[in-house]
Image: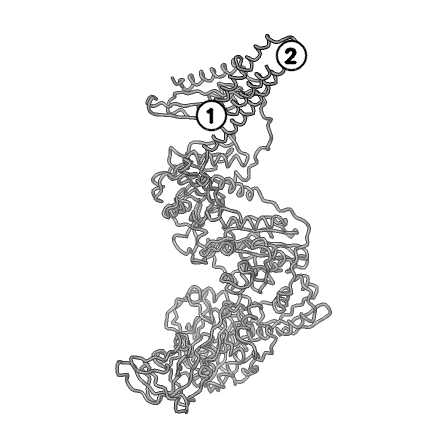
Amino acid sequence: MDDRIELVQSEALAAVSDAQDLDALQQVRIQYLGKKGSIQQLMSFMKSLSREEKPAFGQKVNLCKQTVTDAVEARQKELKAAALVKQMEEEKLDITLAGYDLEIGTVHPLMMIQQEIEDLFLGMGYKIAEGPEVEQDYYNFELANIPKDHPARDMQDTFYIDPNTLLRTHTTAMQMRELEKARGGLPIKLICPGKVYRRDDDDATHSHQFMQSEGLVVGEHITLADLKGTLEFMANKMFGEGRKIRFRPSYFPFTEPSVEVDVSCPFCNGRGCSVCKQTGWIEILGAGMVHPHVLEMNGFDPDKCSGFAFGVGLERVAMLKYGIDDIRNFYINDQRFLKTFDRFD
Amino acid sequence: MRLSYKWLSEYVDLSGITPEELADRMTTAGLEVEGIEPLAQGTNLVIGEVMECWDHPDSDHLHVTKTRIGDGEDDVLQIVCGAPNCRKGLKVIVAKIGAKLPGGTIADKPVRGQVSHGMLCSLNELGVDKKYLLESQIAGIEELPADAPVGETDVLGYLGYDDTVLDVSLTPNRADCSSMWNMAREVGAIMHRKVTWPDYEGKADVGGPTTFRVATKTPMCPAFVGKVVNHVKVGPSPKWMTQYLHAAGINSINNVVDISNFVMLETGQPLHYYDLSKLPEREITVVDDMDTKITALDGVEFDIIKGDLLITTGGEATGVAGIMGGEESMIDENTNSIFIEAAHFNHASIRHTSTRLNLMTEAAQRFTKGVEPLAREKAVARSVQLLSEYADASGFEETIYAGDEKYVPLTVTETVGHLNGLLGTEFTMDQIREVMDSLGFRPEVNGDAVTCHIPSYRTDIERPADLDEEVIRLIGFDSLKSTLPLMSATVGQLSPAQNGRRVTRNVMTAFNLHEIVSYTLVNQDYAENGFAPAGEPIALAMPMSEARKYIRSNLINSVMEVVRYNEAHSNVNNNFFEISKVYGKDAEQERLAVVLDGSLREDKLHKIDERGDFYAMKGILLAWLRKFGFTEGRVRIMENRTDTVHFHPYRSAEIWLDKNKLGVFGELHPVYAAEFDLKRVVYAELTVDPVFNTKAGKLRFAAIDRFPAVSRDIALVVDKNVTAKQLLEVVKKSGGRLVRSSSIFDIYEGEHVAEGQKSVALRIVYQAADHTLKEEEITAAHNAILAGLSKQLKAELRA
């Protein structure tokens, strides 16, 4: 009888492993494990057995049933897995086909630079000032130590609206407003970004409208060396680590001493290239110690405090950083130009 | 300014210093040298003599010469020359084979079949600017004096053109350096070299009594110095003076006029020499209250108005003070007596007049930038000296004065502590004193303090800080350390508006819009015919062009110009935004403009096309406002009653925040769009001040519903004009508190729907916060909604 069981079992196991798909396996299951299946039929031999033999026989049949059931389930897993593999194979995608054309809009490069400068100084506790573009002569010139008919007015050709009103020629006007507002209160740490206007014919390097960002710090014992350190920090953030700063004497009516500031050329590391015209240095901004007369006019005592100010042209920075050769690009707003700036920098 | 290296070296010992080195050091010290150019150039030059000259056989203008350039047998060269003045016996400049001239290198090649071993040169061919040359010098080769030494190879030296000109850009505070003497002092301080000025002092003391009278009737001429010279002999200037004037960019006229210019260059003081015999009276008065006409030195007539400084004699105008002399009293070859004027004219007055007359002469420029108070006296003394020496001047009369300007010498005291405190340096008193010494400030040290006697020409030095600058710029900025300010901590933080701009950028770019920055200045049409101007447009007093005459009071036209540009350059999907201030008389607003021209996202392959239509704009604006915490209830969309000139009357809407109308959005009016060659463009222009500055409600978390929601759809047919808002309001009111949300998910008009009707599909979501809804509850609410829709909007369930 045992032979019989073994025969059925080996037939069943062979059929299970021969089943090539789930339907065939189901047929095998019915054939061997179903109510009328071969294993169930083995039970019909039970009645021909002695009382002593029955339990052992029953156990053997059950074991056989279990073995076949396990085999079916295992085979079922295999076949399911194989079927899934097959299904997935059929689902194969051409991974080289373009993904969805998902674009993110762009921030204007001048605003990118402005925000970069703002963030840099926000981190150092500076406030960001606001001020009108249609400005009074008083804030734009008078308070900045540039009285009427001062030769320095020739440095900036102005769009006047009437004798007392103009389009601001520099963001220094915002500095003056903030100094006046502070009424001698210290410390002052400001960044003044914004649009400014000068009577210039538009060409590749000149624009009647452009953007500046000025900085102003007034406190006790502020030194020219502090200005240098601050600008070095800024240059390293904006043009990459390792930048050096060089001061050259200059003149602005609202600072004394006044300096032009060069940064070591980030393109050749100061070795000399076409961008820096072989000098190793690039002029990026003007700066200086706040003129004592400016402090006085705004209600500060130059014997008790001092300050520094600097101003950078955003177009110039953007042109240098990104190799833009024509300033008009910023104001024409060609989509192809704008889309260049679809990443952070 | 043009600075002659050779002339400068007359005052400063420049031995061993090249022009390039000097330029570097000057730039480092604040006198920026923008260019270096030789006055003339040429290698392989020699002085020669034309021994024979005959016509070229194959040319109607060329000559063939035998030119001797030395005493040797081989020193006679055949050279072909095209100059009309080429002739036998002439002493000439010969550029030998291989000579490098500004125009190129001289090659050994025949000219029309005739051998030519070099070139005979004009000064222009050596790089001398035509404006310093006579017509005859430009037309032909240079004719050297008969005694010119044949064989001399230092031709530029022989000519006096062995000079280099430095183009120095002076900052407005250092106008004093436009005087050669002052520049010499400055260079001496920079290079640590000795400076010697000509000995001219006291030279003006000569002269007998005078009957000439000078007067000034205006505070705009606070000082006038004059001197009569009864005899001068007009003739050519000495060669060195001509060369120095050339180097400075001034043409030589004759010895007397040249001396006035030369002394101006030396001292910085503009001078005017009058032909004494042509002055109708022996009197000069400066006035500024005449309306008249005057013919200036160059023969042009100018209108003079009250306020212009005027030189008068006998009540008649004879010159525009400080700008240009009159024609009648001009020095010419027959002049034999002169009157010297050295005056102070107010910089502002000169500036106004010269700007108005468009007459920025060398003198005017100098007055405008400021002339040192003692230069007048120096200039008169130096004039007397040079006129005596080079124009046989004699018959001087005593120097006469008008005006009450007094020069008060200035001293400035600085301490080592204050200086180092401002600069952040550790300079010693010795270092400081050395700088002050080199500048001629005659420092007096008293303990920690140093008192400087500021020379009259250094009008830029008024305060200790000015001295500090001198010290750092002359010692050099290289010694400066880098430190950060030591001060009490402050918190850096964005204002609501600054934050608002950043949030706006984030939102708009997330929707694939590109930020633009367009010009503030626009034309009159744009300024006056725009969307909701912020106020009456502001015009510039003196615009550069009609196209940029007004400050924009709105953004629409500028933005449409950008879109038109992009369309014209075949850019598609031009979706932009701009955040900018706009202005009107006494009004300032900050605005956001958004333009959709095409699709927000378009991908044919994956069949995506998010069209930039009215609803896209509405979605963008609501999402933007939501980011600020403003949602339904506070934000309202209303019929556009603001502007149907720029906007399509039936495809635009106003958008409000609380009680503030922010602006309008929608399709452009077809007529307006056509002005920019545009079609269905969607635009929004909103004032952002209320958005940035209004407080939103608190951000709070509401517990997530625990009980399931059930959604039911309804398909209705309603009158075409029933709005979405009407439908959803009825749903909300009729359905009661179980209606969690409702939305329209389909609208259809056309076939199978009666004319004038539309089919609308609604989805209603039911949910309760405290229990799972039972079927009966949902059905009751749903039936109430259907009844409400039917009753109030005549909406019928679609069959």
Dot 1 crowding, Cα within 10 Å, few <14, some 14–19, many 20+: some
Residue type of the residue flagged with mark 2: Pro
Type of the residue with mark 1: Ser
Please give the name of the residue rendered at 65% of the width and 48% of the height, measured from the top-left corner. B490
Label 1 sits on residue: B743
Residue B593: image quadrant is top left
Q: In the shown orientation, is residue B531 left or right of residue A269?
A: left
Above or below A331: residue B658? above
Q: Is residue B90 above or below residue B7?
A: below
Distance between mark 2 and mark 1 Cα atoms = 70 Å
Indicate which disc residue A55 carries: 2
**Same chain for the residues at labels 2 and 1, yes or no?**
no
Task: Please rate how many residues cluster around mark 2, counting C-alpha atoms within 10 Å: few if below 14, some from 14 to 19, many from 20.
Answer: few
Label 2 marks a residue whose chain is: A
The x and y percentages for residue B591 are: 48, 42
The chain under label 1 reads B
Say what secondary structure mark 2 lies in: helix
Q: What element does badge 1 sit on?
A: strand
Residue B240 in view, yes or no: yes
Between B599 and B658, the one nearer to me in the picture: B599
